[in-house]
Image: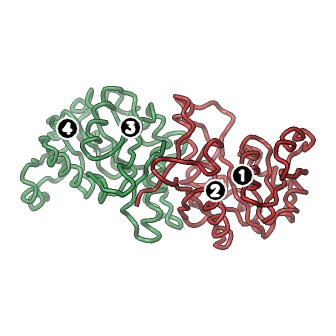
Chain colours: A green, B red
Amino acid sequence: MRVGVLGSGVVGKVLAAGFARHGHEVMIGSRSPETLADWLQENPGVGSGLFGDTAAFADLVVLAVKGTAASKALELAGKDNHAGKPVIDATNPISDEPPVNGVLRFFTNLDESLMEQLQKQYPRTKFVKAFSSVSNARMVNPRFEGGRPSMFICGNDEAAKALVTEVLDQFGWDTEDMGAVEAARAIEPLCMLYCIPGFTRDQWTHAFKLLK
Amino acid sequence: MRVGVLGSGVVGKVLAAGFARHGHEVMIGSRSPETLADWLQENPGVGSGLFGDTAAFADLVVLAVKGTAASKALELAGKDNHAGKPVIDATNPISDEPPVNGVLRFFTNLDESLMEQLQKQYPRTKFVKAFSSVSNARMVNPRFEGGRPSMFICGNDEAAKALVTEVLDQFGWDTEDMGAVEAARAIEPLCMLYCIPGFTRDQWTHAFKLLK
């Protein structure tokens, strides 16, 4: 599968390397791909390009930018380049205000998530929320004594969610499908919960699991 | 310990019975305690009273009413009757609007939780968020193949949280202390996530666990 990762911060790099490790053809997109030369040398299976090249190349797009930059990144990628394609939305609506007692500030509210905003702006794109509630240190094939962690996903397109479920299985996660795009109202705040032990006691190596 | 449960819906009854089973002296509070006669006969260790009696009786108060009624219940209980006492806040800010694709509507936003509102209204009361993200069917000593589930708690008073941690241990839960009252912004939305499998496929028997 051809995977195009939009965003070359640590999350984008970790996910791009993870997809390459699992045998996919990977391109990482950046506004300034020339800055990635060193990283590309350490990750020989991965190509690089501008956002537009990356989205055009991809069968599966991964959106891995800051939440404040998500809409703009999709615009730069060219809406026709991701229309009809599954897009893993790993972003969170983290505002630029500082956390309060370790609790992140979001620029969204409980009646409209970031992914709903993106889905409205790009109605032909098949967004699936995933990788939004775990640190980059545990995104790819994490190991826990308690077994596989759970990734809560949602989105309006069933085929896109089925594809992301296969990806998550490769990446060592059980998938919990929470339904349509509105479920992002409940999934995105998991990032706030996840980061509290991080900000308050520098713990970034946990993950959520749904016991049944 | 004397435990006073404010609220005689199913959550209040389940928690009251759980505290009685664990050897505590329990009173269940209601606006109309006379309606509890049958239930009290089946639960002989538990007494009943009005909200004020119940709060005055208690060393530990449990707030188990609808979120829309939480502030009023604490007013009816008499603020001097719960001032200085630990109060387990099991409520969620669920609005009267119907869920959207299984996603509950809240009357709060991500920058102010219900527990923060209550803490501001009753500054001398020692609120601890707990039991807000699990169905009544799994509140008391639930059993899962994957081990003990995690209860995410928060609150401003360390002694109150230590007491609630002991209670949770009795009730079969691992406690994850998320810090001060603002963390309720992240804990309360877990109720939305929890209820999606309930509303969309009638699954109400799961619980969250934090893998570390």
Question: Do the residues under discs 2 and 1 have CB atoms within 8 angstroms?
Answer: yes
Q: Name the amino acid type tagged 1.
A: Gly
Please state which amino acid type lies under the numbered disc 2. Answer: Phe
Residue B192 position within the rendered picture, expressed as x and y whole percent measured from the top left: 56, 41
Q: Which mark is residue B203?
A: none
- Closest to the camera, between mark 3 and mark 2, is 2
Residue type at numbered disc 3: Leu
Residue annotated with mark 4: A55
Judging by the rendered image, the residue that carries numbered circle 1 is B18
Under mark 4, the amino acid is Ala
Measuring from the top left, give residue A5's x and y in whole percent. Answer: 21, 45
Q: Tell me where residue B178 appears, x and y as whole percent.
A: 54, 63
Could you tell me which chain the residue with mark 1 belongs to? B
Q: Distance from label 4 to label 1 (Cα)? A: 55 Å
| Marks 4 and 3 on same chain | yes
Q: Secondary structure under badge 3?
A: helix
Q: Give the chain letter at badge 3.
A: A
Q: CA distance from mark 2 to mark 4?
A: 50 Å
**Disc nearest the viewer among 3 and 1:** 1
Describe residue A189's horizontal placement relative to residue B105 as left or right: left
